[in-house]
Amino acid sequence: MLKIAIPNKGALSDHSVALVKEAGYKCSRGGRELVVRDVVNDIEFFYLRPRDIAVYISKGIVDLGITGRDLAIDSSSTYEELLQLNLGNSRFFYAVPKESGMTPDKFEGKRIATSYPTIVKNDLKARGVTAEVIELDGAVEISIELGVADAIADVVESGRTLVEAGLCTVGDPIMNSEAILISRTAATADKDQVKTFIKRLNGILLARQYVVVEYDCPQAVLGAATKLTPGIESPTISPLNEEGWVAVKAMVKQKGINELIDQLADIGAKGIFVSEIKTCRI
């Protein structure tokens, strides 16, 4: 039976469960159970702390796991990244008091608080900077005010929490993170059951990027219309009963769809509507 680890709480858990369910797997918990068995697909889903998933992967206890790239790297575990899931996107920054004038290259001898000590130590080493890394379990923003640290390093999303603490980010992002699917070795992806799982997840991820647009247009502007909606291979074009008119159907990127509709309407297209795609293969 294939063993797959899923984050046990938080937004990453919610997004991961939704993705796996859309891919056709039974993984939802009825309560707070740690294991859910999908008998039909011969899979056991284990709900584990996101920080621990890469550790379980590296020891071969589970076959696959969904976790954040930042958490996987910080665990110092051995793993292979199989698929980027485009979930939980975030950036990792240093932050300092607004008026301090400090930059990462001036951290020599400073104290840096973080919940990601491995990432910070690796970055400081690459910069040739020696500083004290203070490991805290969350809420690192307050550490400067309390006199525990001179700077912090943390995941930044909106940045509102930093502003409220009187801090600002400095330097380029230390790293960009997102949810990833990992395994102990790349060879794991060669197993048929794993191939199917990855294909299904990828199908959902692709479907989220595309929609199907359908419209009627005069034959005279068909060339211009199909330039706007070329489809994956080519659009589907069908004649209409009204002479000189055709129906067009194409798969297009979801991003910018409203602008695309405006452009189609401007050249004379009628009856334009857009449908979501649940899953696909390209």
Image (cartoon, grey):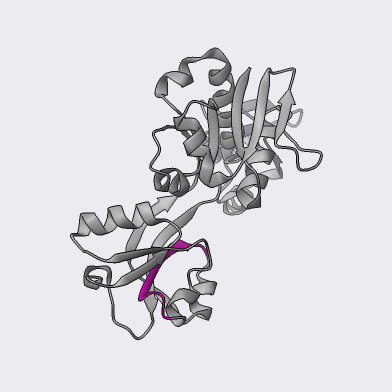
Tell me the quarter of the image containing the N terminus.
top right
Q: Any magenta on residue 149? A: yes
Residue 47, quarter of the rendered image: top right
Residue 210 x, y percent position in the rendering? 59, 39
Percent x, y of residue 83: 48, 33
Q: Is residue 225 magenta?
A: no
Relative horizontal placement of residue 245, taking residue 125 as reference (left or right) = right
Q: Quadrant of residue 211?
A: top right
Vertical position of residue 117 compared to residue 236: above or below: below
Tell me residue 9's x, y (percent). 66, 49
Horizontal side, residue 6 vs residue 241: left or right: left
- Residue at left 53%, top 25%? 63
Left/right placement of residue 145 relative to residue 277 reads left
Q: Does residue 186 sit above or below 8 in this rendering?
A: above
Residue 98 shows in the view:
yes
Residue 86 in sight here: no
Foreground of the two, 164 or 242: 164
Residue in the picture at 59% in, 45% down:
49
Q: Residue at x 41, y 80 (%)?
A: 147
Please provide the residue range marked out in magenta: 147-157
Q: Position of residue 65 (x, y in %)?
A: 54, 34
Question: What residue do we see at 40% from left, 69% from top?
Answer: 152
Q: Residue furthest left?
A: 128
Q: Nearer the viewer, residue 247 or 95?
A: 95
